[in-house]
Image (cartoon, rainbow, N blue to C red):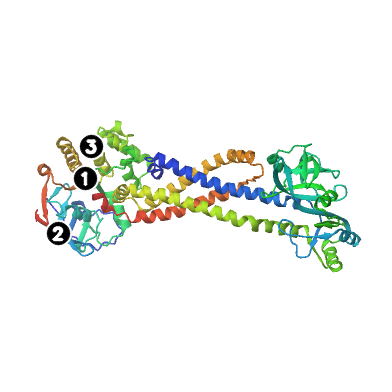
Amino acid sequence: MYAIKFLRKQPLRLVFTIGGIALCVILMLFLFSVYGGVADGSVKYIRENKVDLWVLQRNATNILRGTSFLSTGHGSVLKSIEGVEVAAPVLFVLVTVKKEGKESTVYLTGYDPLTGPGGPPEIVAGRSVRSDDEIVLDRSFAAKFGYALGDDVLINDETLVVVGLSGGTNAFVIQYAFITLQKAREVIGFSGIVTCFLLRIHDSYDAATVAETIRDELPGLEVYTHDVFLRNNIREMEAGFLPLLYTIASIGAIVLTVILSMLLSINIIERRKDFAVIKTLGAPIRFLNNAIIIQACGISLAGCAAGLILFFPMVTVIEKLSPEVSTKTSVFQIITIVVVVIIIALISSWFSLRRLRRIYPLEAFT
Amino acid sequence: MVFAAEIETDIPSGGIHMNNVAERNNVFEIKGVTKIFNGESTRTFAVRDVSLKAGEGEFIILMGPSGSGKTTLLTMIAGLVSANEGTVHIFGKNITHYTQRELQKIRAERIGFIFQNFHLIDSLTVLENISLVQHFSGTGRTHTRLHGMELLRSFKMECHAHKFPQQLSQGEKQRVAVARAIINNPRLIIADEPTASLESRQGFEIINLLNNYKKDHRACVIAASHDIRLKRYADRVVWMEDGYIKVD
C-alpha cells in the first residue's frame, strides 16, 4: 500500500489532519443527533397520544408554532356529534417558572388526567398528575434546574408539587410540563378556553366521515386525522431546525473539504520532486490517481473512526452538563456521515489530482 | 560496434514486444532531432539537429558544458520530452507518436534511470524504493520483495533493506539508486550525472556497478557527466556544445 506509505514521513501533520476531520465528523454527527433528539422530543407527545382526530381553531395546523383558541363549549358540541366517543380538551400555554431568582420557560400542558388523553407520552419517574396542585416536569428540564420528585414549582404565583418526570418531552428550545386542565386555566386566568380537542371515535364509525360532519357543524374549526396532524408538526419542526442544521453541516463539510484538499495538495507540492521521479520511473497514471484517492479516503476513514470513538463519550458529557440537549443517534446517521465524508474525500482528491497532473517528469532531472 | 540495418518505424504503436534482429542490436536511435523551448519572449534551442544511435553493450558518456543539451537529449531518448523535429527510436520502435501510456510502459519495463541527487523516495524504505519500479511494471508484490532482497544481497545492502534513505550514506544511496535502475533488467540505463554527488571512490564504485551490469546483460548505458575520469570506462564519449554534437 504505497499510497499510505507516502504519508508516513509527516506523522504529526497526519495526526492533525485526522483530528481535524474527526472534529468535523463529530460536529456533523452531533448536529444530526441533536436533530434526532429534537425530532423525537418535539412530536413524541403527538405520536404517543394516539387519538383519531385533532380539532383546532381554523387555520391552525400544528401545536409547535401555531395558535389555537377554542371555547369549552365546542367540547359539548363535539361530544354530541354522532360517532365521537371522547372529546378531551387540552390547553397549551407558555409559562415562566421561577426558582431561586432564575426564570425559565416551559410548555405547560393542561389536560384532564381522569377522562382524557393528552398527558405525558412517557413517565420515567414518579407518576402522572391526579390533582390540581401537582405537576409532571420534563426530566431534562428537571435535571437542568435541579427539580426532584416532591419539590415545589412556582408558576405565576401558583405552587405545584413535582409528582413525576416525563420522557420524550424535550423539544430542545422548550420542554413540556403537565398539569390538570383546571389548574392550567387558573394559571392563565381564563376559564373558558382550550387549545384543542383530542377525539376518539367509536370503532363502528369512520374517522374521515366524522371529521367531515364536524367541519359542517362547526365551520370555525379545523379537523385533522392523527397521521396528518403528526406530519404537520414534523414539517413545522423541520422548518425551524433544518435550515440551521443544513447551514452548520454545510460549513462542516466545506471545512472538511478544505482541510483534506490542503493536506493532499501540500503533500504533493512538498513532494513535487518525488512525484516527478515516480512519473519518470514509469508510474502508470492509475497508480498515481489511486495513490491520491486512497490517501484521501484512508485519512477520511481514519478521521471518521476517531470521530466516532470520541463522539459517544463526548455526548454523554454534554448531556450531563446541559440536560436540555437531548440527542438521538442512529446507524443511518452514522452511515450518512461516513458516505458524505467519503464523497468529500473524492472531491478533495480531484483538486489534488489536478495539481499532480501539472508535475512533469522532466522536473526529476533538475 | 555492429548495428542492425536501418529499420522502418511504422510499427503500430502499443506493440512493445520486440524480438526482431534490429531490436536485439539497436537500443536507441535518434535522427535529426531538434528541441526548442519557447519562453515568453525567447526561443531556446536545447538540442539542434542531433543524430545518435547506440547498441547493446555500449557505454556512452555525454559530456559538455552546462546548458549544452545533455540532459534534454537524455530525456528525449527516454520519451519524456518530445522533439520539435526528427525522430526517436527505442528498441527499434519510433516512439515519436507514442501515447503517454505507451511511453510509461516502456519506461517502467525497459529503461532504468539514475538521477544526479539519487532521488530516492524519503517516505519509502530501501526495499520499497527498489520494489516500486517492479510494481510499476505489473509484477506481483511477493515477487518484487523477493527480487528486491536478492538484488540488495548482491549489492551487499541487505542489512539496509528496511532503512529509510536518510539513514544511508551518499554512496549507499547511489547504490540503492543503481539497484532501483536495474531491478527490471532494463536494456537501456539513462543516468544523469550519476557520480556528481559522490566522492571519487564511491563514484568509481557506481560506474563499476553500471559497467558490470552492461557486460552481464548486454545493456546500453548512456550517462551525462562532467566527470572526465569516467572517460576510461566509456565505449564512446559524445561531446555536446550549444545543442550540437561536436565530437562522437
Whether the residues at callouts 1 and 3 have beta carbons within 8 Å, the answer is no
2 or 3: tag closer to the N-terminus = 2
Give, as a three-letter code, the residue at label 3. Answer: Gln
Q: Position of residue A340 (x, y in %)?
A: 53, 52
Instruction: Work out whether A67 lies above or below A260.
Output: below
Query: At x 18% / y 56%, what residue is drawn?
Result: B29
Q: Position of residue B36 (x, y in %)?
A: 20, 62
In this view of the protein, can residue A193 be seen by the observer? yes
> What residue does disc 1 label?
B116
Give, as a three-letter code, the residue at label 2. Answer: Val
Alpha carbon distance from label 1 to label 2: 23 Å
Q: Position of residue A1 (x, y in %)?
A: 41, 43
1 or 2: tag closer to the N-terminus = 2
Q: Are marks 1 and 2 on the same chain?
A: yes
Q: Are marks 1 and 3 on the same chain?
A: yes
Tell which of B95 and B176 is nearer to you: B176
Using a 10 Å C-alpha cutoff, classify the residue at mark 3 as few (fewer than 14 neighbours), some (14 to 19) or many (20 or more). some
Disc number lying in front (2 or 3): 3
> What residue does disc 3 label?
B170
Disc number lying in front (1 or 2): 1
> What residue does disc 2 label?
B50
Residue B45, disc:
none
